[in-house]
Amino acid sequence: MLIWTLWALLAANCWGQALGTWKMIPDKSRQSSGPLAEAITVKYEAHPKLAHPNAETWTFYLVRTDGISETTSQTLRFDGKEYPCGDLGLEERPETVVSTKLDTRTAEVSYKRSGRVTRRVVRTVSADGRQMTLEVRITPENGPAAERWMVFTR
């Protein structure tokens, strides 16, 4: 029984490595076209009201290069199932979202429109838990794909 309890505590700790508040490091971040936002803070929180053990709410606080602030939030269920994503204000206007945890430090979120992935986000937390990267690939129906590589610290 003690071994199962220790395993459960370890697993809960590993799955929650991304939880908390992260600030983007502009000098280490980039995107394929145009300027990156002036400042980005992202907050990940466990979602206690859902009966799903791997549900998280993320909130993005962004300051654009023109000084305008934007806030976006969404709850994700990391079970590999497709859910409606609502209107997040994303330019490709996805209809559904699928979230999975690839391992204890990596999660993948795919946004779809008409069954096609239009935005893929891979979140990786460093082994020491001090740094996080978000790799974003946007593939609109028309126009060129865009990529963002954002590095964050606590």
Image (spheres, rainbow, N blue to C red):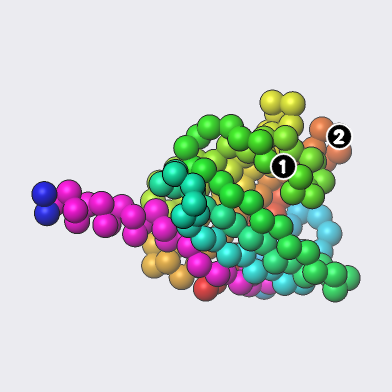
Rendered image: mark on residue 127: none
Q: Nearer the viewer, residue 12 or 148?
A: 12
Q: Crowding near pointer 2: few (<14 within 10 Å), some, many (20+)? A: few
Residue beneath the point at 58% across and 32% down: 82
Residue 80's place in the image compared with 19, above or below, is above
Q: What element carries label 1?
A: loop
Using the image, tell me which numbered label, if any, was put on residue 86. 1
Q: Determine the image quadrant of residue 36.
A: bottom right
Q: Which residue: 11% across, 54% down?
A: 2
Q: What stretch is highlighted in magenta?
A: 3-26
- The location of residue 79, given as percent across then percent down, is 47, 37
Q: For marks 1 and 2, give the CA distance.
A: 22 Å
Q: Is residue 154 above or below residue 17?
A: below
- The residue mark sitting in front, 1 or 2, is 1
Question: What percent of the width, then of the height, locates residue 120?
Answer: 64, 42
The picture places residue 148, in percent across and down from the top left corner, at: 69, 54
Residue 80 painted magenta? no
Question: Which residue does the numbered mark 2 point to in the structure image?
Answer: 142
